[in-house]
């Protein structure tokens, strides 16, 4: 077997490399001078030794061996520097502890020693210094390594070890770990055992491609032959780290390949590769950039959060390292071994980060985007309390949290906002007859409906259900210069949210020439939103009041944003009825037979440049206590591209 034992989550003790600046300063030249005059007491000699130790110069002190032989101060300085070992960069605080105990020509003095280790960890103890009085040389120190620490002997030194803390878990809304230590296998290659690098690459590539579900992006092995050629013959050349369940699928294909080596470890991972990937971020081995950006914070082998919540809450999650000091000795064959631990301060684990995510809802959202090749997002909000229960990005979990950061036109989903404004102002009602022509011209600019449809004169509810752009363009003056923006703010758009992470809450077109206001009325023009902003607005319609969505419950963001005013009951009831008609008789009829409670919603097809063929696809809606927004970048139409994702999502929820 070549699979090594699993490495514990708590990183093994390892030696730190410290500067040898003080060590060099303690390597002295010249011969030792005698101590103080015969009239001086032992305390003055001890105090001089303390000063000399800290200054890196003990040349003014007289030293003798336990047998009474004179000992050059240069030898003492060199041994003192060696004994200090890894603590050479952090000189201790030294203090003579009381008066010396003198018996005839022998004196014993206590020395209080306190080291400040990294992280301001303090290690204190007391040692003894023995001195002998010579008739012509005064008090001389009987040199012994035990002066530095009572357990040190010649040839020993202090070894400082850093104890990595356990990373704090990311929890779901129920307080259960979402990101937790999970088994992985690190696949590597030993160059000396490889028969044919090219054949090995072909075999590994074929095996990796066979993993279900397919790894995305594919593992790039093109540089492996060059890496093998540059590495030492017995090196472990890292190829890839796989979750154990993925490794198990191909173990029999790669285990016996010449040169392959395997190491079992644990990594902090979500339940699946895709699970809220862009939101959560990743935990990876420390990178050079991490160490350069935060000097002294990390060591090789540390695991560091990158991106998303893992990166944003790195300080909270990473914990505080502990430190231990051991005695390290060198055997005659040159082997260095560390023995008894003299001091240890435990590492402090990272604090948990509790989110509002719901595992079942997040899993359903990830699955709904799984087959989507375009960049996409699905955000779900619990209507009753505003908790974000799913934040999904595609494809493959996404590399960017588009759900929060996208700044894109909302298209016809924004008719939900403009309709609220029109209803509250009394400009129109659900049963009021309005015109839905094929085209409408406003201030010289012509607007059309999708595929050029024409409904003629119909009730406003039909216009909303069929998503007639021209009607909204003609009704735009009824909103006034700022009416659309005011309606958007009632639904939380443009607000200063306190989510604990960065998010775009929208920018609603206001004022402007008639043509701009006409375009803005059906989600075009300069209005921009994110999927998060539209999910929050949709939840507000379902609830009858805007409430800021929440993501982090511990630590809760300070100064929570107050809820918005209650929406006009008549207006919001009418709007809900029209959003239900979108599903029963309009552009989202594919959702009509979704199991469970009734589905409400609005489709959207948003042009993002001057070419009408270039559009984003949208759907916003709710079912039961879950409001959501679906967005597909460059996705075509809301009906054909966003609604199927919504259907997959809702059907998955219905089976949970």
Image: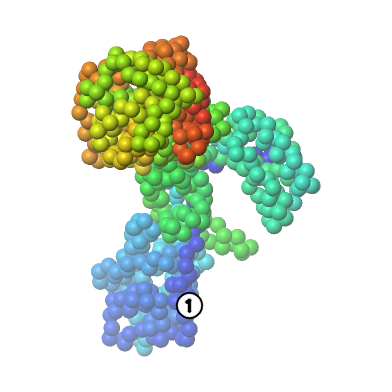
Pointer 1: residues within 10 angstroms few (<14), some, or many (20+)?
Answer: many
> Splitting the image into 4 quarters, where does residue 501 fall?
top left
Q: Residue 27 placed where, x, y %?
A: 48, 77
The residue drawn where x is 75% and y is 41% is 202
Q: Nearer the viewer, residue 567 or 308?
A: 567
Q: Residue 366 placed where, x, y %?
A: 49, 28
Q: Residue 357 placed where, x, y %?
A: 39, 29
Left of 243 or right of it: where is 376?
Answer: left
Residue 535 at least partly seen: no
Indicate whether 395 appears above or below 312: above
The residue drawn where x is 36% and y is 73% is 54
| Secondary structure of residue under mark 1 | loop
Left of 281 or right of it: where is 564?
Answer: left
The residue drawn where x is 30% and y is 24% is 419
Indicate whether 572 appears above or below 485: above
Residue on which disc 1 sits: 27
Left of 144 or right of it: where is 383?
Answer: left
């Amino acid at each position: 077997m070549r699979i090594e034992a699993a490495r514990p989550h708590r990183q093994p003790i390892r030696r730190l490399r410290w500067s040898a600046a003080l060590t060099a300063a303690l390597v002295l030249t010249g011969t030792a001078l005698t101590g103080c005059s015969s009239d001086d007491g032992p305390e003055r000699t001890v105090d001089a030794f303390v000063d000399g130790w800290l200054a890196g110069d003990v040349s003014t002190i007289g030293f003798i061996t336990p047998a009474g032989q004179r000992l050059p101060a240069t030898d003492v300085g060199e041994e003192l520097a060696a004994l200090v070992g890894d603590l050479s960069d952090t000189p201790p605080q030294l203090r003579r502890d009381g008066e010396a105990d003198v018996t005839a020509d022998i004196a014993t003095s206590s020395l209080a020693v306190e080291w400040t280790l990294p992280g301001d960890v303090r290690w204190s103890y007391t040692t003894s210094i023995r001195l002998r009085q010579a008739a012509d040389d005064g008090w001389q120190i009987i040199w012994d390594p035990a002066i530095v620490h009572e357990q040190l002997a010649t040839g020993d030194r202090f070894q400082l070890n850093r104890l990595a803390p356990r990373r704090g878990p990311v929890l779901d809304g129920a307080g259960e770990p979402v990101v937790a230590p999970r088994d992985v296998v690190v696949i590597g290659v030993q160059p000396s055992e490889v028969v044919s690098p090219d054949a090995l690459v072909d075999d590994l590539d074929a095996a990796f491609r066979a993993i279900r579900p397919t790894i995305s992006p594919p593992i790039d092995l093109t540089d492996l032959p060059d890496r093998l050629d540059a590495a030492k013959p017995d090196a472990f050349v890292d190829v890839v780290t796989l979750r154990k369940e993925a490794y198990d699928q191909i173990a029999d294909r790669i285990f016996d390949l010449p040169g392959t080596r395997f190491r079992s470890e644990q990594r902090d991972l979500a339940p699946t590769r895709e699970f809220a990937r862009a939101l959560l971020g990743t935990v990876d081995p420390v990178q050079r950039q991490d160490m350069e950006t935060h000097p002294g914070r990390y060591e090789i082998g540390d695991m560091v959060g990158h991106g998303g919540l893992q990166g944003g809450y790195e300080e909270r999650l990473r914990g505080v390292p502990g430190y231990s000091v051991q005695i390290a000795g060198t055997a005659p064959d040159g082997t260095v071994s560390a023995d008894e631990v003299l001091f240890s301060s435990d590492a402090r684990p990272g604090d948990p980060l509790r989110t509002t995510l719901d595992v079942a809802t997040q899993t359903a959202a990830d699955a709904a985007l799984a087959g989507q090749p375009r960049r996409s997002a699905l955000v779900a909000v619990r209507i009753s309390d505003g908790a974000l229960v799913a934040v999904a990005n595609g494809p493959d979990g996404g590399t960017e949290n588009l759900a929060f950061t996208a700044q894109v036109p909302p298209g016809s989903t924004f008719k939900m906002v403009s309709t609220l404004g029109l209803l509250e102002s009394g400009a129109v009602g659900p049963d009021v007859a309005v015109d839905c022509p094929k085209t409408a011209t406003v201030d010289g600019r012509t607007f059309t409906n999708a595929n050029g449809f024409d409904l003629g004169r119909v009730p406003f509810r039909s216009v909303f259900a069929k998503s007639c752009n021209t009607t909204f363009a003609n009704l735009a003056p009824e909103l006034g210069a700022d009416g659309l923006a005011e309606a958007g703010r009632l639904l939380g758009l443009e607000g200063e949210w306190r989510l604990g992470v960065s998010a775009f809450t929208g920018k609603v077109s206001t004022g402007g020439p008639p043509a701009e206001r006409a375009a803005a009325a059906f989600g075009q023009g300069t209005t921009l939103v994110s999927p998060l902003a539209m999910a929050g607005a949709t939840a507000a319609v379902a609830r009858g009041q805007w409430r800021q969505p929440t993501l982090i419950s511990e630590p809760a963001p300070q100064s929570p944003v107050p809820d918005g005013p209650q929406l006009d009951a008549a207006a919001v009831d009418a709007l809900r009825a029209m959003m239900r008609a979108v599903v029963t008789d309009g552009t989202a009829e594919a959702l009509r037979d979704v199991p469970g409670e009734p589905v409400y919603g609005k489709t959207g097809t948003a042009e993002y440049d001057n070419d009408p063929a270039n559009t984003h696809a949208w759907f916003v809606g709710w079912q039961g206590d879950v409001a959501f927004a679906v967005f597909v970048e460059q996705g075509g139409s809301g009906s054909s591209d966003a609604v199927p994702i919504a259907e997959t999502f809702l059907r998955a929820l219905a089976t949970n």
